[in-house]
Every structure is written in C-alpha cells, then in structure tokens.
Image (cartoon, rainbow, N blue to C red):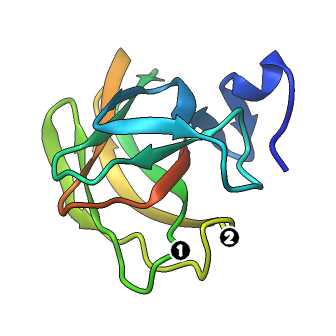
Amino acid sequence: MPSSGAAAAMIRAVTGGTAYPAERATLSGAVIDTRHPDYTGTGYVDFTENTGAFVQWTVPVPAAGTRTLTFRYANGVTTGRPLAVTVNGTTVNAALPFNPTGSWHTWATTSFAAALPAGSQVLVRATTTGANGANIDSLTVT
C-alpha cells in the first residue's frame, strides 16, 4: 500500500543512490494517480493518451560521470510501452523498454547507464514515444 505522511513524498536515499518520486516531478500530458496500490510515495504518474507526454525530474549531480537511471513502473497491458529518456534535452535512450508487468499494481524496474553532467539542476525526462506510457512511480539515480 502507499506510504503515508510528508516523508513519503520526499526524495529518499536508497542503497547506492537516491530515489525521486514521480509525483514530485514536472508533468506534461500526465496526471498523478492513486488508483493502483503498492506505489512508494503519495501517488504515481499516469500518462494520458497522447504522444509526447512526459515526466521530468530535477536531480543534483555533484560530479559528472556515468550513473544508473532506474525507473520503477507498472504496465498492465500485454505490450511494451517504451519511453524516450533525455538528460538536459539530449537523448540518452530513444526507446527505454517498459515491458508488461502483468497488472497495474505489479511494479517492476527498468534501468540503463547514462552519462550525466555535473550540476545542481540536471533535468532527466521520460517522454512517451507512442500514445501511451507505463505508470511511473519513481526514478532512482545511482
């Protein structure tokens, strides 16, 4: 079930990295939802049906280097719903797979390594490449 309280909506340290809740990110063509259980914060991002919808996090990166970007998501349909991932406007993965998870309340992760520049406000954006996207719970940077 979802966590409660203000702390649940805050950025949280995880083993080797930091998790950024999707419900605290900047959204376009998406909404915060709570219909499906077991998300980690106060909600998750549910993309509306339009190409180009996105969720964007502002993350601090103390030193430039390769980091692992891990997205926690649910995809209750039988087909994958890839998202394009950019860092400060540069594509770092044109079609990151968000494969079916079996239901909208079964959460999984998908990860890849990306070079991130140093900065206090590095922008990581995941954008729908088709009419739909998976439900996004969080981004973890390790």
Quarter of image, res 18? top right
Q: Is residue 20 visible?
A: yes
Mark 1 residue type:
Gly
Q: Say whether residue 70 is left or right of residue 27.
A: right
Please tell me whether mark 1 sits on a helix, a strand or a loop. Answer: loop
Q: Looking at this view, is 40 or 59 the one in front?
A: 40
User: Marks 2 and 1: which is nearer the front?
Assistant: 1
Quadrant where the C terminus is found in the figure: top right
**Residue at image point 40% right, 62% down:** 112
- Number of numbered discs overlaid on the protein picture: 2
Residue 106's label in the rendered image is: 2
Q: Which residue is situated farthest in the top direction here?
A: 120
Q: Looking at this view, is 19 or 102 the one in front?
A: 102
Mark 2 residue type:
Thr
Please tell me whether mark 2 sits on a helix, a strand or a loop. Answer: loop
**Residue at image point 22% right, 43% down:** 86
Q: Say whether residue 115 is left or right of residue 141.
A: left
- Check disc 1 and report the residue beneath it: 76
Q: Residues within 10 Å of mark 1 (few under 14, many from 20)?
A: some
Residue 34 percent location from the top left of the image? 66, 43
Residue 65 percent location from the top left of the image? 36, 39
**Residue at image point 46% right, 52% down:** 68
The answer for how far apart the CA atoms under marks 2 and 1 are is 8 Å
Q: Residues within 10 Å of mark 2 (few under 14, many from 20)?
A: some
Residue 99's label in the rendered image is: none
Q: Is residue 141 visible?
A: no
Residue 126 percent location from the top left of the image? 31, 46
